[in-house]
Amino acid sequence: MTDTAHTKRTIPDRLGTKTSRILASWEVLLFGVAVLIFIFNAFASPYFLDAWNLSDATFNFTEKAMIAFAMALLVIAGEIDLSVAAIIALASTAMGAAAQMGIGTPGLVAIGIGTGLACGAVNGLLVSGLRLPSIVVTIGTMSLFRGISYIVLGDQAYGKYPASFAFFGQGYVAWVFSFEFVLFAVLAILFAILLHATNFGRQVFVIGNNEFAARFSGIPVERVKFILFLLTGLMSGVAAVCLTSRLGSTRPSIAQGWELEVVTMVVLGGVSILGGAGTIGGVVIAAFVMGLVTFGLGLLNVPGIVMSIFVGLLLIITIAVPIIARRVRDMR
Amino acid sequence: MKKILKHREILLLAIIAIMIAGFASRAQGFAAPGNLANIFNDTSILIILALGQMTVILTKSIDLSVAANLAFTGMAVAMADAAYPGLPLILLVVMAIGIGACLGAINGYLVWALQIPPIVVTLGTLTIYRGMAFVLSGGAWVNAHQMTPTFLNFPRMPLLGLPVLAWIAIGIVIGAWFVLTRLPFGRAAYASGGNPTAAVYAGIDIGRTRFFAFVLSGALAGLCGYLWVSRYAVAYVDVAIGFELDTVAACVIGGISIAGGIGSVGGAVLGALFLGVIKNALPVIGISPFAQMAISGIVIVLAVVFNARAERRAGRIILRDRAAPEISA
């Protein structure tokens, strides 16, 4: 009965061989799932194995994955941000309003990213400054941010974006590699370095494992958390730029429900929702798994809402299977 | 501790009263008994769901699947009623509660037996249940003319000056109060959220308590499925989308600690009424209904700030939260 406590209390610095094997097998397992889905898709639909189709498929997850990287750090540190989709809505609304005033593409990008940072700062101040529980704070700010979009837009939509703005969501860097996909890859590497190869990343793990000990070790817990919320806001702003550019319009209901998909991606990637464990590599594979599932089902004409059943099942099963397996192993 | 709790409910009541008085000064007749009864009736479903949510939150869990559960059960009973108009209403209501309880039991089982964190479980079942509503209906709507008159009219039937819907809410408030303060289950719920370590040593099965909290929340969501569909006279897949957050908001405003173990039935009811009054007042005083979302967002953030201060005054220990799951798991 001590399984969850077991994984939670271990500090990555001194991981036992058993736990490291479990962690390693998680990514391997997930990768296996991704390969299986890929093979299944290739057999199920003749249109799947086409470079351009596969390139299109990446749009299913690149924007969400950008946020998921930052969210992974936040979850590892023991916090969560449910307001990310609402930040997209607000940032997109701000960009839309600016575009109507005739502001050019560089200005729009700055406004989108700036709005994201500002929203992240609000969350960060509330959680680390006032030491409030992040899950309720971000449920509140989620209503607030999207609510502001609704006040500004009501049932209207912004449409007139400059032509050059379309590059971020629709442009290609080389051959079939879209700007979004390249950005996704670059961000994945940057976040992997930040989490796995810097002092800051180490501090994130320590805070998630034992915040109390982290405090006594002289880690500026509140500052690290504030930076993480800022980072999540920043990535939401970047995702807002990409999504708005891809859609070419802004409604207050933009990216509705994405917060749950982003959290699903993070958890599917093997990040412990209790904090203290996880890798960026896992999140990257999880992003591909979710993208492949939705795209493959889409080719088979499965409606979006039915796909969400598969995503939900995937989330629960991938978490339940290792737990059951570990329990069976422990019984022996 | 009890004094503070009492104090804060009176405070919340006073704030609601001031709000109503304020709105009444801007719009004649807002404080008329008839209108207040209307607001209560309008908020009934939120009150019922908030009580289920509160029970789950007390045990240090959260149920994000209530609205999806509501949508699925609502669709199921509406389709049953449309397909077999001969079915007696009581059977349909029992069916709604039963389906809801089963869906809640699935959440509870995953939390209890597999020890998956509640937020992950209900995040998953949220999408699954709503997806199932789509699979069940094929995306079609069940409209008013397909439902039988008894099915539609029962919650609206006036009884001693209030519609049946409001009476059901009152009955469930009393029932929840009884269960949480007078039955062993209620004690166990408070104990397993307030201090899981102590609860285990006191012989309380935390997993089982959480399981039953989820079953209760699911059963109430199922009942609300019927109430929602018949009140709004339509069933479709996106019914009550996002409503799970309103139930959490009602709890937070009502002073129920998200960390578990703290909160009262009165608080949850007042929290729901607070949101209900705002929702009903905005159109009356000429504020765009689009502003409602931002306002409830600000209210939630303020309520959390206020709660945290109240809890700190009560002398909470920082370590408690971290040490607890070790034993409870």
Image (spheres, coloured by chain):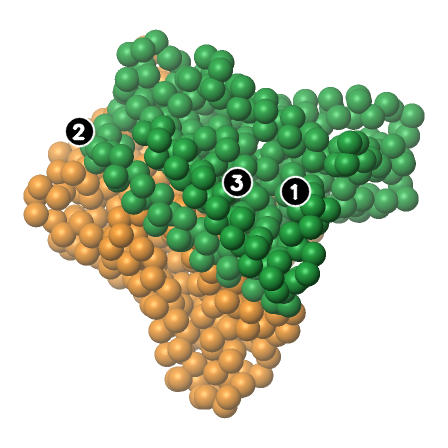
Chain colours: A orange, B green
Look at label 3 and name its amino acid.
Answer: Leu
Q: Looking at the image, is mark 1 or mark 3 earlier in the sequence?
A: 1
Q: Say which element carries label 3.
A: helix
- Identity of the residue drawn at 35% across and 39% down: A273
Measuring from the top left, give residue A187's x and y in whole percent.
32, 63
Relative horizontal placement of residue A57, taking residue A114 as reference (left or right) = right
Residue B147: quarter of image: top right
Residue B270 numbered mark, or none: 3
Chain identifier of the residue bearing label 1 in the image: B
Label for residue B154? none
Residue depth check, mark 1 versus mark 2: number of the one nearer the observer: 1
Q: Quote the CA–CA distance across marks 1 and 3.
A: 11 Å
What residue sits 42% from the left and 17% below the top?
B187
For residue A279, side relative to residue B120 (left or right): left
What x and y, as percent, mark residue B238?
A: 68, 48
Q: Same chain for marks 3 and 2? A: no
Q: Local crowd at mark 3 within 10 Å, few (<14), some, or many (≥20)?
A: many
User: Tag 2: residue type?
Assistant: Gly
Element under label 1? helix
Q: Is residue A210 left or right of residue B180?
A: left
Q: Is residue B279 left or right of residue A282?
A: right
| Whether labels 1 and 2 share one chain | no
The disc label shown at residue B40, or none? 1
Task: Determine which residue is flagged by label 2.
Answer: A16
In the image, is residue B34 above or below residue A98? above
